[in-house]
Amino acid sequence: MKGKILDYNIQESKGIISGDDGQRYSFSNSEWKSSESPKANQNVDFEIDGNEAKAIYLVKSQIPDFASTLNIEGSEARKGAVFGAIGSGLTFFTIIPFIGFLFGFIGVILEIFGIKKLSDNAKNDRDIFKNYIFGVIFLLVGTVLMGIIMGAGMIGGMASMRMDSDFGAGVGIGTMIFGFVVYIIFGILSIIKFYKALNSIGIEYNVPLMQLVAKGYIVGIVLVPLFGLGYLVLFVAFIAKIFAYLKIEKQ
């Protein structure tokens, strides 16, 4: 069971944990297994013995609990789902000129927080967060490499045109095409990781719509070359993902 320490009395060496199941469990310092001392608001992992918490471990590498700040009620999974929905919705506003990238950046960060909570509270598949992060990394690396390679090819091609060098111009165009191919390769790797993460969320939290969204991303990428039909599929999947997040358990 996972939960959060509500209160800890140093004098009595006793405390109260609020479990993710909505129940409260008392514990004594003798059951604390981590080197860092217990205190309020720490996230913990523990075993249950009636109304008592046993074998309590501090969950390290915690993300900031913005859910408390935003007063999001429900289980940790529900909080993660709300973060995911908000973050996913904000990324839509990247289409706004000049300031759109700010919405995109904030949206991605919030969705990452949400995915982390959903992954930590999953019963079987704890690789959800890892797959999602790799998807983000592959997408960023592919975009950066494409920009560098295509930029170099464009500069080289323009320089060759000034020197009337057909060979140099050809190399420049070839380099730009190579940059696009690199982006496609990393894009495919990214989509595969996103598919695994979203499909696992759908399975873990019994949300078929999220599984459909995961498949929609794959189908959309495949159909992109067909007169842009894939973009329509990706847009529908994007909107559906927001509603899929909000279908995840409220308690």
Image: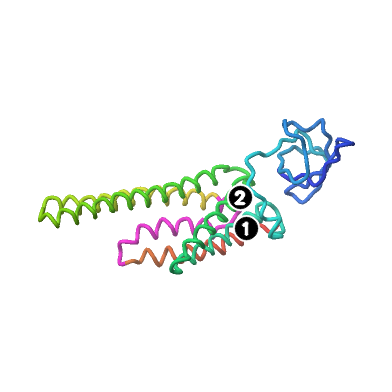
The amino acid on which the numbered mark 2 sits, given as a three-letter code, is Leu
| Residue at image point 77% right, 38% down | 38
**Magenta segment boundaries in residue numbering:** 201-227
Q: Which residue is mark 2?
A: 118
- Residue that sits furthest to the right in the current view: 12
The amino acid on which the numbered mark 1 sits, given as a three-letter code, is Ile
Q: Earlier in the sequence, mark 2 or mark 1?
A: 2
| Residue at image point 72% right, 41% down | 44
Q: Quadrant of the N terminus?
A: top right
The numbered disc on residue 248 is 1
| Residue at image point 10% right, 56% down | 164
Q: Is residue 208 magenta?
A: yes
Q: Are marks 2 and 1 in contact (CB under 8 Å)?
A: yes
**Front in this rendered view, residue 57 or 98:** 98
Main SS of residues in magenta: helix
**Front in this rendered view, residue 157 or 218:** 157
